[in-house]
Amino acid sequence: MEKAPIHNRTDILVIGSGASGLFFALKTAQKRPDLKILIMTKSNADESNTRFAQGGIAVVTDNNKISFDKHIEDTINAGGGLCKKNVVEMVVHQAPDRLKELLEFNVEFDKKSSGDWDLGLEGGHTQHRILHHKDISGSEILKKLLIQLQRMPNITLVEEHIIFDLIIHNSRCIGAYYYHNESKKIESIQARMTLLCTGGSGQIFKHTTNPVIATGDGVAIAHRAGAEIKEIKYVQFHPTALFEKDKNPYFLISEAVRGFGAYIVNNKNERFLFETDSRGELATRDIVSRAIGAEMEKQHCEYVFIDCRHLDYEKFYQHFPTITDYCRSIGIDIRKDLIPIVPVAHYQCGGIKVDMDSQTSIPNLFAVGECSRTGLHGNNRLASNSLLEALVYAHQSSEYICDKIDSVSFLDPNESEGIFSNYQYNITLNYSEELRNFKALMQETMTALFIKNTNPVEAKSVIEEILSKITPLFQKDTISLQLKELQNMLAVAELMVKEFLENNIKARAQQ
Ligand code: SIN
């Protein structure tokens, strides 16, 4: 991406460049060419959780009432009684319109030779309804949206600029502090509306499918600004990440592979999932992950396997070239070899609480995509509903903001005196051994809490101990970006632990 100058004010600030941020920006820029939109992203434009989404996007494509009802029912059944029905209905019914827009942006999904959509199946789905682009659906969406973006003169995208905190004035969000990678200073930008599209927090855990930038920044900065966070402890573990001991992130073996007919087997080559659920490999992710965890414990193994050896190789390769090639690159021939897999942290189902227009509890602050909690996913997201949620809520917030932004003004220069100069740090990129060790301890602790059900009281004391050690570092003149990132991860970890503890108190009260 070309470098663009950053002005100290923009009508709309979008933080993050995954599907939610880009789709929002494009729709809004088309509708309101008079508005300036700035997308600020932490890494490269195409580095986000969206890029790693292999499976695809769940959409009813036959316009049949029964199909819509079944998609709604499957989403609610996966969500463990915590989904909001009105939200689920809105998202499922809007899906065909959002798909149409994606197609207008030249996003391509696979078709059969008949010309019909080649719809995939994944765990928890009772019908084939997943549109996919081979096994790189997220990457295809990003690529095409980024091309469209270049055509919009009122959108500026800046890479490698990290948001430090939101600026709140008179209880409203009026912009953000960010690390300017040229001045190497923290600077401020004023915005009439701000949208957090910062993705998930998988890096809080030892192993994850999320990229290294997924450090829960949006949730942490929204929480520091006073926004309500909800259901953050519902972290979805993906049952089939490729086991490679010290890899970060873990490579995903898409759930669509099981939908295609692959088996999960233990070290004795036995299928064991039917002992837990009659759907076997096609049960929802929470059930499959737990069953794999229990089997690993029973067999004293670090992983189980996914078996593709019985599948039609030609067809498999057509659908999953990236997975097949990656396996081959590390010496696994899927025609002959079993693929070692393990459940790892994959998706944050809760987050910044938003309403149906994606508004947070802070006026003029919005959250879209994985960092938000809309009520769609409950405690366990149905596979391939995340890209759909991102598009629908990008649409909802875009409509709302286009309608309301004219009533929001920038601060008067007299009024803004002193408001935008809070941060005086110098920034270094040095990643000290001490910070690395704190991060590893946090990851170990949070992984044990989620996987081994260790006592949340112990996790609380470890997280608090690390926080007490890093807090004084913020008093120095120079801080590192990694310190800020660690502070964000710890803030999210602390929120998760707090929900675990509240849950335990509730459970005891009900006994
Ligand atoms: C997958 O392909 O299994 C991941 C996509 C998703 O998380 O929905």
Image (cartoon, helix red, strand yellow):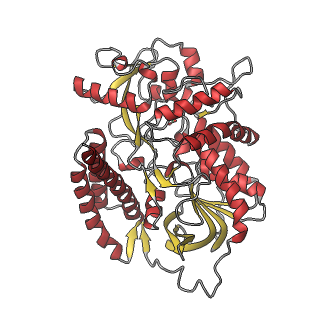
Relative depth, front residue between 376 and 303: 376
**Residue 217 vertical placement versus 107 (above, below):** below
- Report the side of 119 relative to 52 (left or right): right
Residue at x-position 50% and y-position 73%: 186
Relative depth, front residue between 244 and 490: 490
Q: Position of residue 456 (x, y in %)?
A: 25, 50
**Residue 484 vertical placement versus 492 (above, below):** below
Residue at x-position 46% and y-position 77%: 423
**Residue 86 vertical placement versus 132 (above, below):** below
Q: Position of residue 304 (x, y in %)?
A: 33, 24
- Report the side of 246 relative to 11 (left or right): left
Residue 243 visible in the shown view: no
Residue at x-position 49% and y-position 73%: 185
* Res 415 quadrant in image: bottom right
Residue 338 visible in the shown view: yes
**Residue 70 vertical placement versus 473 (above, below):** above
Q: Position of residue 275 (x, y in %)?
A: 33, 18
Q: Position of residue 70 (x, y in %)?
A: 58, 27
Q: Which image quarter holds the C terminus? A: top left
